[in-house]
Every structure is written in structure tokens, then in C-alpha cells.
Amino acid sequence: GREDSAVLPTAIVDAIAGTLTAMAQVVPGLERVWIVTGSQIMDQIYLDHARAAVDAMPGGPDVEFLHGLSLDALAARLADPPPDTAVLLLTYEGDPQGNIYRTVPDVLPRLLEVSAAPVFAAYDSMLGVGAVGGVMTSARSYGEQAARMALAIAERGSGAVAAGEPSLRTAFDVSALRRFGLSPERIPAGAELINDAAPGYLEYLWEFVLALVIIVLQLGLIVTLWHLLRQDELPEILQ
């Protein structure tokens, strides 16, 4: 039989470590990080990845693993965190009662509604939907890598195929940063920014200032003419 084999490596441990490092830079005075996972098998896998990342780090803020809490209990914790706390949401595929959830469409919005602590991410499907961002694995990168591996297997016919490491994406959502009172100026150098458009009143600031200056000048001219009329000096000026 054929002996095709390929292992698609995951960069999630590096993504988690990179995000934890970025969190310490982005959040002034960060003292603790809550890493959130649910109760399903996939959640346990991501919890193990997170523990490996934390164990390999030389230091940093205190890390607490919020694993296997009900969604209500988790929301209550995030609504009233201690000062200088930030959250890293990994996966929440289910709760202790066996209810099944999808992390991004179901759990992330629920937590963002109540969280008083900024919520960071380690994979980019959370970017643009409320999470602050981080050093993230990319679904697109994994897809491209899998496609390259499939083509390599097809060309070789048999044998192992080296996968290589998927690339990580360092990106932050400026609107989410501002929502949690964080400055975009603190993000790591070279990071990608999304939702970086200036507020509407700033986007047209110069146009607004110019219009205001014209209005003030016109008002000054009108006032001057009115005073001249009252003093009967305008007809002499016009002659």
C-alpha cells in the first residue's frame, strides 16, 4: 500500500507565547492574564498548548487558567476582574453541562458584552469582531500550507512530505484597543493594524477648520459693515 504521510504542525504554542508577550507591552501595568478555555476535548487540547507556552516563558504577569467554567460563571468573572487584568480567549467549544458552542460566533460576543478586561486572541478569526488581537495563527496560512502539502504528495506519489511551519500574523484592532482604553502606540513594532480609520470628525478636521475660518471672517466683515452703516461712513467709502 502507499505510505503517504504528512504532518501539519500547529504554531499555536508560539502564538500563545507571542500574544502573552504582546499583552504585557500593550496593557500598561499588566499583573495577571486569564486564559479561557471550555470543557470539550478541543478545549483541553488548547489548554495543554497554553500550559506549554506559559511553562516555556521566562517570566511575566501571573497566569490563571479559567478552564471548564459555565458561560454564565465566566461572564461574571470577566465583568468584574481585578485591576490590571487581561484575557486571552482560546477556545470555548462546550460547557460542563455538555452544551456545545462555537467560540467566535457564540462565546466571544457574549463575553465582549460584559468584559471589563481587554480580550486578546491567538488565532485571527477573532480579529475584526471585537477581540483586541495578538500574535495569531492564520486560517489562510494553514489552508495554503495544506494545499502545498497535498500538491507535494500528488507529485511524489509516496513518502513523507515536510510541512514547514505556518506563519503567524501579528495584528491588532484599533477600535477594540480604544474600546478598552488602550493606546495603539503601545503595540509591537511592525504589527498590522485594522479599523485604524480616524473618527468622522477627525477625518474632515481640516475642512471643518477652513470652513470655520471663512465663517468667522465673513461674520467680521458683516459686523464691520454694520458699524459703518450706523456711522454713515459706508456711503463715503463706496464713493
Image (cartoon, rainbow, N blue to C red):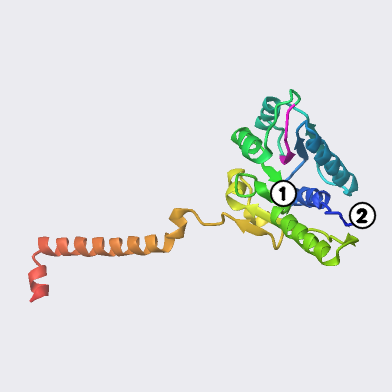
Please tell me which residue lies in front, 198 or 31: 198
Within-10-Å neighbours for mark 2: few <14, some 14–19, many 20+: few
Residue under the point 60% across and 52% down: 174
Between residue 158 and residue 47, name the one nearer to us. 158
Task: Look at the image and tell me in which quarter the C terminus lies.
Answer: bottom left
Q: Position of residue 217 (x, y in %)?
A: 28, 64
Mark 2: which amino acid? Gly
The local crowd at label 1, few if under 14, some if 14 to 19, many if 20 or more residues have their Cα within 10 Å, is many
Q: Kindly state the secondary structure of the residue where label 1 is placed.
A: loop
Residue 61 lies within the magenta run: no
Q: Nearer the viewer, mark 1 or mark 2?
A: 2
> Which secondary structure dominates the residues rendered in magenta?
strand
Front position in the image: 200 or 94: 94
Choose top left, top right, bottom left or bottom right for residue 100: top right
Q: Is residue 137 visible?
A: yes
Q: Measuring 58% from the left and 44% from the top, which residue is drawn there?
A: 179
Position of 195 with respect to 100 (left or right) is: left
Sequence order check, earlier mark of 1 and 2: 2
- Residue tagged 2: 1
Q: Position of residue 135 (x, y in %)?
A: 74, 53
Contact (Cβ within 8 Å) of mark 1 with mark 2: no
Most extreme residue toward the top, as rendered?
Answer: 97
**Residue 167 visible at all:** no
Q: Which residue is mark 1?
A: 123
The residue drawn where x is 81% and y is 41% is 46
Q: Which residues are magenta?
A: 86-95
Secondary structure under badge 2?
A: loop
Q: Position of residue 215 (x, y in %)?
A: 29, 61
* Image coordinates for residue 119, horizontal then vertical, percent: 68, 42
Per the model, the C-alpha gap separating discs 1 and 2 is 37 Å
Q: Nearer the viewer, residue 134 or 63?
A: 134
